[in-house]
Image (tube, rainbow, N blue to C red):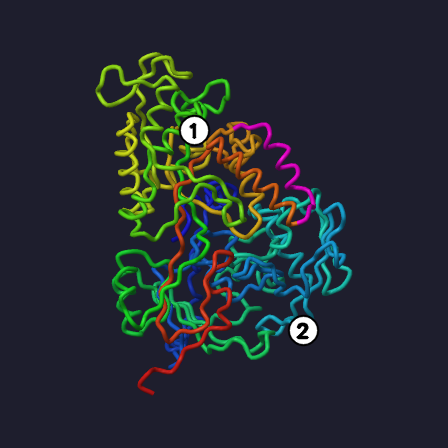
Amino acid sequence: MQPMFQKLLTLSIALLILTAGCSLTPPAEPEATPTPTSLPPLARVVDILPEAIFIPIPIDPPSFNAYINDTGYEELIGELVFGALAEIGPDGQYYPELAAEIPTPENGGLSKDGLTVIWHLRPGIFWSDGDAFTVEDVVFTWESLRQSGIYAPGFDLIEAIDAPDELTAIIHYKEFYPNYRLQFGGEGTGVFPAHQCGQPDRMLLWDCNFKPVSAGPFVLAEWEPGERLVFNRNPAYWVPERPLAQQLVFIIEADKDRREKMLKHGSAHLDLWTEDPQLSRLEEEENIFLFATNPARFVLRLVPNLSAFGNADATQPNPYLADLRVRQAIRHAIDVPRIIEEVFNNRAIPTDTELARNGCSVSPYTYNPETAKVLLEQAGWIDQDEDGTRECHGCRNAVEGTPLEFDSYYYAEFGNSLAKAHKKIEVMLYDVGINIHPQPVEGVDLWGTWTDNGIEIRGNFNMDLWDDGYYGIDPTDYLYDLYDPHAIPTQNDPLAGLNVMRYRNPALGDIFDELRAPISDAKRNQILCQLAIILYRDLPATPLLSLPDYYAANNRLQGVSPHIYDTVTWNAADWFLLPPENQ
């Protein structure tokens, strides 16, 4: 499954794309030469090898550049060509890739104040066209993001990069960036070739977005839009005896049933983000192996607006949801295990904090409608007319007699499962006297910009249902954007952050100040768990369940190891096919 709330407020990207008036699809191939049979290089037919690994995907990737797109497919192919300075492995630990080591205080790579980071690059790495990989590529990547106005976490904190030699980058920050280790890497992003891409201020128009040279295990050999992408082994790859496979072929196939048949028949070897009903059918196949990411990354949650509809002013609280007792009642009224069983085919995990994968624990909420009713009575919501919907009779923030009834939006593109889940939540809440009306909304409307009258950014909602999750192992930036009082978007500062709940807890200011200091990982995790308890008590959002990503592979495919910290192609250099059984 791919994320829903990703990230609407990567607003600078969306705005830049709109204002640039350009399309992020592969550019048209150059016209053929006068010889009728001669075709441009990438349009020539590439021989498909017998041992090629086939991966069907539903759409063409919008580009190779995961800084300017966020569909998941640009990450998938970008990982094959753009190396990262460092990445995170399946065990949740950082490891150097194009860098020789991870900068730490112990090895002198991180200054005491956290404002200087020194990266030493691996020697002897070359791009597939023969040019050396150097610090120039690192500087170029930063300059390009800065000059093109493309948002990428932490790059706005870099003041300068010194290059004392070809293999050393000294990065100067204006404030400590907690996720500095993934500054030039992570989930399909990495370092760009300075000699190939183009002008730093023209990133959206770069040729290397679609025809990149490679510092990774594979090289693009052919891209036929709507048909396939073919990657051949990169003979210049710096890792000895890798990649194991000679060729990867991504087949464009939008039909889920056809992708399923391809996998069963062995004409495809890997299916990505597999969902039911295909998932249940493939589970019964002897020649198919299923992977589920563990722990799960994406958390389905209810998102309340704590301010009045259409207003970010704390002095104008939401008439229904600003009262914590109402939010607690909503959580107690929802039977999460039942939703997991009846909607998600027992493939989801009950979740009370999205920081569980950081080792943080809280007491699970229990399904208890009677507790929910008591909380609502205490909050002044009583069904005096006995029509099934409670009204305000002494409640804190609504006009006397106001019914406890409002619309609740969900992300339409998610599909039927979210609609079914929302419908069950509607019934469960009505059983305790809360009358919500689920409404599907397109993501472009729900998460649009302030200029485009985005529903959440302007506060034009009461309670929404969507999923999201943080990449990597340090959620500091993610949590700040969602929960810090300074991250509430307003008309004067629409890019302040993603705190569309209008949640304000002054205690979080000190916590985030600590998290933004250069502290040990153990201390950071301790503070994160303190934050988990505060969020559990305050319920600025209500976590319900976590959704693993599922992948299905033909048994011939070996070496695949999906995890939540990177895209599935993170170790494509280790993939290979076993010989067919009849050989």
Residue 516, magenta (yes or no):
yes
Residue picked out by circle 2:
124
Whole-percent x and y of residue 228? Answer: 37, 68
Question: Viewed as shown, does residue 485 lie left or right of 125?
Answer: left
Check the picture and name the quadrant holding the C terminus: bottom left
Spatial distance from mark 1 to mark 2, Cα to Cα? 54 Å
Q: Using the image, determine if residue 263 lies above or below residue 152.
A: below
- Mark 1 residue type: Asn
Residue 346, magenta (yes or no):
no
Element at label 2: loop
Residue picked out by circle 1:
305
Element at label 1: loop
Whole-percent x and y of residue 70? Answer: 46, 51
Which numbered tag is attached to residue 410? none
Viewer-proximal residue, 186 or 527? 527
Please report the residue visible at 43 percent of the width from the left and 58 percent of the height from the top.
Answer: 293
The residue range painted magenta reads 504-520
Q: Using the image, determine if residue 326 lies above or below residue 426.
A: above
Residue 255 seen in this snapshot: no
Q: Quadrant of residue 382?
A: top left
Q: Using the image, determine if residue 393 lies above or below residue 488.
A: above
Question: Viewed as shown, does residue 157 lie left or right of 574?
Answer: right
Please report the residue visible at 41 percent of the width from the left and 17 percent of the height from the top.
Answer: 397
